Each structure stands twice: as C-alpha cells, then as structure tokens.
Amino acid sequence: MSDLKTRPTDQKVAQFIEAVEPHQKRHDCWAVVEMMREITGAEPVMWGASIIGFGTYT
C-alpha cells in the first residue's frame, strides 16, 4: 500500500474557516462543521492546507 500524500496538520480549523470569504460562506462552513461533529462524534482536523477531516479509517 502506498503512503498517503495528505496528512493531518497542526493548523487550526478555526483559523482556516475564519479566513473564508464572504461572511455567508464562512457561516455555512461553521454549520457544516457542527453537523459533521454531531454525525461522526469526532473533532475536526485539518488535513493538508485546505481539507477538514473528521476521524480516520484504518
């Protein structure tokens, strides 16, 4: 099996989302994050520079 190219980073999800423009899109991002937290039971983690992930599969 090959290695993953995208890996979890230490970048903060909140920092990434707060940079999203316009305001409505940022508001929508927060709504999706809250839904995904509830659905997965996992906290969001940045994967690479622009992907927010919830949990991992092994």
Image (spheres, rainbow, N blue to C red):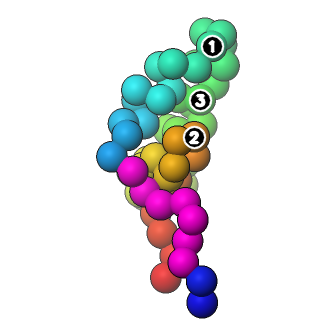
Q: Residue at x 52, y 42 (%)?
A: 49
Q: Give above or below for 1 relative to 30.
A: below
Q: Residues within 10 Å of mark 1 (few under 14, many from 20)?
A: few
Task: Give residue 14's position: percent from left, percent from top.
Answer: 40, 29
Q: Can you tell which mark lies on residue 21?
A: 1
Q: Residue sitting at 51 percent across and 49 percent down?
A: 48
Quadrant of the frame with the N terminus = bottom right
Whether residues under marks 2 and 1 lie with C-beta atoms below 8 angstroms apart, the answer is no
Q: Amino acid at mark 2?
A: Ser
Question: What amino acid is at disc 3?
Answer: Cys
Quarter holding residue 23: top right
Helix, strand or loop status at disc 3:
helix
Indicate the amino acid at tag 1.
Answer: Glu
Q: Which mark is residue 50?
A: 2
Point out the stretch of residues depicted in magenta. Answer: 3-9
- Upstream in the sequence, badge 2 or badge 1? 1
Q: Alpha carbon of mark 3 to alpha carbon of mark 2: how far?
A: 12 Å
The residue where tag 3 is placed is: 29
